[in-house]
Amino acid sequence: MILNKPSLTRQKHWVYFAIALILVIGVYVVYGVNMVNWRNSPDFGWRTMYDSGPNVVAEVMESGKAAGLRVGDVIQAINGKTYTTFDDLYLKVRDDKIGSVNTYTVLRDGRTLQVSITTYRLGLSNVLIRSGPLFLIGLIYAAIGILVFLMKPKAPESRLFFAMTGSLGMMVSLSGPSDLLHPLWLFSIRDLIEKIVPASMIHLALIFPKTRTVLKKIPGLWLSPYLIAISLFIACKVSSSSYWHAPHVLILLYYVYLLFGIVFFLFSTVWNLFKDPSIVIRLQSRVIFMGLMLGFFIPAADLFSRYYWGFYLFPNPTVGFAIFLTMFPLSIGYTIVKHDLFAIDVIVRRTYGYILSTASIIGVYALIVSLLNVSFRSSEASRSPIFSIIFALGVVFFFRPLHERFQRFVDRVFYRQRYDYRKTIKDVSEAMISILDPEKIQKMLIGSVVKEMFLENGLLLLPDKKTHGYYVHAAEGTDVGNLASVQLLEDNALTRIVREKNNAILRDEIDLNPLYEKDREALRQTFHSFHSNLMLPMNYVNTF
């Protein structure tokens, strides 16, 4: 039995994953059965929303439009019966028999109207139109979490990411029902899932892409977001008889908590992006930040344009929001799975180059069209096929050199990569040929590297035969005063790994690569003692 304990401990992440996966699959199966059964449900021609109340028309279907019902209408009575609750609407005042006619007393712009709508069978196609898109998008969220976990199952952030995407996916999938959920306890599951979403976002922000210092000092702090979520859920259950009867103050508190979870994650990402000293953490945060902007900014722009200009970016704002929100979990999943995130830097640099090049071409096109319109007092010149052909040929011949110029500009000004590195190696090589003094070569070497590559500090360590270690022989930079006395001993873990690997080791690599798990703490301390982010071995061959 004792021999089995370590094995069970090593496999516990699979146990947690299996339990969570069974719960997620169970919810989706039950909801899927509901979708199939809804094909026989009545279609009343309109729907309301829980946050707007049972009397306000939030969506109008074809039969409702044909009868003259509009979004925003206030239903005062159905078939002569007044009502104030969702229970009355769902179970008492409407006739749900297929073919029956319901007469609605409607208040619109201060006038009272009578609208009669025939009740039809909903049908599977209408169910798929109303509930299918959100069901599929939520399923995609959950699938992203499953895929990330399977690619990196031992990482704690993978398990937490699956918890977030699973709960977010179920919340999205269950948010567009075509009829009542059966059994009714599924509404309680939906309510709990909604409360868990902001808690899981806060928890993930506390440990990824780096564990916050406050969580290290207070390990149990991660429970706080979930305690708030459970408290909100219990308060809703105690104070209301059903999901749609929750007090408005509790609904408002939930929306505030959900907004806080999003803002907390955004603030954590921005803080890492600009303040964290780790290159890898900043790159990870950059990708997540881009996912956040795409996931929330574009849908927000759609809502803004709808409200102020009546311009629709997406026919269905709910579906549009859900589709772009996929960028958010995708960006986090990519950063969790990807070990070597410096490839992202290359993608970002190339993207900037193409953006500048494309923007220049669009600007030139707009300028030429404007000049032609002003010169000829007409837009016919710019609409001519000859003009389009000439401009297209110009783009073919000039886009590549233009793009290369912009890319060199981006690389040099913002990233200082490749071109500067090659120039530095060239300058150092030429200088070493002309200098015979080893001391001058060593100082010039570290000085040139720090200066040309815009580094803060640089140290050159040489072997010491007496101590059987390495000492700082040359230092260059802004903060090297306390580093001259630091030594790297022969039996140090970093010395051994550099010798075995015979290649550079990044400080952030030791946190990401499981190969360094045994020596991780010792490696961290060594990097910290040298205030270093990179250790690079330099080999030479004595030919004498």
Image (cartoon, rainbow, N blue to C red):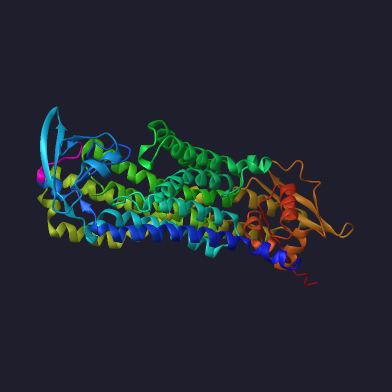
How many labels were placed on the picture?
0
Q: Say which quadrant the N terminus sits in.
A: bottom right
Q: Which residue does the image show at 23% across and 36% down from the upper left?
A: 56
Q: Which residue does the image show at 59% across and 62% down from the upper left?
A: 15
Q: Is residue 471 magenta?
A: no
The percent position of residue 93, horizontal first and vertical second, equals 21, 41
Q: Main secondary structure of the magenta part?
A: loop
The percent position of residue 61, horizontal first and vertical second, equals 18, 49
Left or right: 274, with 34 as reference point: right
Q: Residue 14 sits in which quadrant?
A: bottom right
* Residue nearest the viewer, comparing 16 with 332: 16
Q: Say which quadrant the C terminus sits in.
A: bottom right
Q: Which residue does the image show at 50% across and 46% down from the upper left?
A: 201
Q: Which residue does the image show at 39% across and 55% down from the upper left?
A: 138
- The range drawn in magenta is 67-73
* Residue nearest the viewer, comparing 432 with 505: 505
* Residue nearest the viewer, comparing 523 with 99: 99
In the depicted structure, whether residue 182 falls above or below residue 480: below
The percent position of residue 112, horizontal first and vertical second, equals 12, 31
The percent position of residue 332, horizontal first and vertical second, equals 49, 53
